[in-house]
Amino acid sequence: MLTSTALVLLMTIPGVSLFYAGMVRKKNVLATAIQSFTICCIASVIWMVLGYSFAFGTGTPYFGDFSRAMLRGIADHFTQGQDAAFVMGAGSANATTMTIPESVWVMFQMTFAVVTPALIVGGFAERMKFSALCIFTILWSLLVYAPIAHWVWSPLGWLAGLGAVDFAGGTVVHINSGVAGLVAALVLGRRRNLGLDDFSPYNLTYAIIGASLLWIGWFGFNAGSAGGANGRAGMAMLTTQVASAAGALAWMIVEWFHAKKPTALGIISGAVAGLVAITPAAGFVLPGAALVIGFVAGIACFWSAAILKPCLGYDDSLDAFGVHGMGGIVGALLTGVFAYGPLSATEANPAGVTGSLMQLGRQAEACGVTIVWCVVATYLILKLIDFTIGLRVSQDAELEGLDMVLHGERIN
């Protein structure tokens, strides 16, 4: 679990940082890269102070409470002579006994809370104020990410109680971040001179390295969500590899037919799409199903990024919704179709989670409520920031580039 935690952190710094920085223009590379680094710092502190308590503390099925604020009680097993196990959701019918130290669980979940707001940057890249980004990260982490994590992953959560499942973050991380990125793109508006100036990526080598680091880090993301070194973790790792490869090939093939050339950006985007889609399913499906999920995600995300976006005219700069939102929806729904019960069977639930029309309905409900909450809360947060300090840099600043205007630095 310690290794998995480090791998998930690798997804944000340097994974997302390089992936996104390589896809923007030269004048915005440093500003884009440092956004992920800064979000890592802010989200880590927020998670320690309040986020973990809001997500996994006791409370109602809808919201956590302040019972674990500042990680209160995390040292109890040292001072009381207890072993490493701790009970999450004590007092609920779905209480879960974790067999790892709570400090490891807190840190593992912290890395998820770090990567999710970092992914949103793809929706508004090259045009948000740095100060606005910092405040947005604080408010969004507490008011959007933590509540949805509570609904889905806390034993007290109401979506968990309904039977909806999300192995490693299809709803909590990817639909959440993708939809938030789309809302941000719509609220901020299109980049200046989009369609007139050259918006070609500055350095796709950075993006390829970033995507490769994401792929490697994703093994911690998915296999680590099994909670230990066991058969389910091994299956999650295998399905992750299969789905990512299938997503890359699907995007490549469709793009080859559509644009007559398979691009480097397309292939790495397809790989990420496959990773996104298998995330909610990794611990519930077999390799054959993972192959299907990856291929479907590659095609669906290509359609969203290359056809739907130009058709509707919104500026989701780096396809936060096109890849993460759409891929998360595909994966969450197909989990309800392909789930293989024995992978998740327990003494309390011998049948495990099995693909069925009923399970598909539960997955669809989880997708729907995640989208609705994320849209409403994200919009209100963005409008509040815009009303107080402003969201977007000036036209002159955007044309000059965020590296020099916001940070006083540039790539030579």
Image: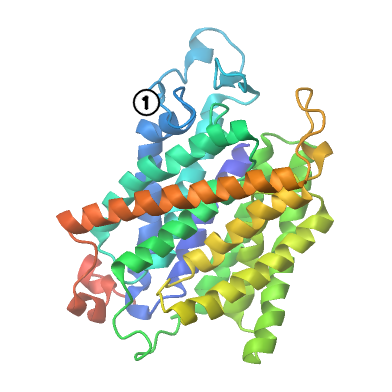
At a point 50% along the width and 39% down the height, the residue shown is: 149
Task: Say which of 377 and 315 sits in front.
Answer: 377
Q: Where does residue 296 sit, x and y in percent of width and height?
A: 71, 67
Q: Is residue 181 above or below residue 107?
A: below
Task: Say which of 145 and 78 sits in front.
Answer: 145
At a point 60% along the width and 77% down the height, the residue shown is: 266
Q: Where does residue 308 sit, x and y in percent of width and height?
A: 52, 76
Circle 1: residue type: Ala
- Badge 1: how crowded within 10 Å, few (<14), some, or many (20+)? some
Q: Is residue 384 above or below residue 90?
A: below
Looking at the rendering, in which quadrant would you find the N terminus?
top right
Any part of residue 121 in sight: no
User: To which residue does mark 1 refer?
Assistant: 69
Secondary element under disc 1, as helix, strand or loop, is helix
Q: Is residue 304 above or below residue 149?
A: below
At a point 54% along the width and 31% down the height, the residue shown is: 154
Place residue 283 in its image quadrant.
top right
Left/right placement of residue 142 relative to residue 225 reads left
Any part of residue 208 in sight: yes
Looking at the rendering, in which quadrant would you find the C terminus?
bottom left
Task: Say which of 226 and 316 sits in front.
Answer: 316
Most distant residue in the top direction: 80
Left/right placement of residue 337 relative to residue 81 reads right
Place residue 404 in its image quadrant.
bottom left
Looking at the picture, the colour scheme in use is rainbow
Most distant residue in the left direction: 388
Q: Where does residue 147 sit, x and y in percent of width and height?
A: 44, 38
Q: Where does residue 382 sit, x and y in percent of width and height?
A: 28, 56
At a point 48% along the width and 65% down the height, the residue shown is: 320
Q: Is residue 394 above or below residue 198?
A: above
Place residue 225 in its image quadrant.
top right
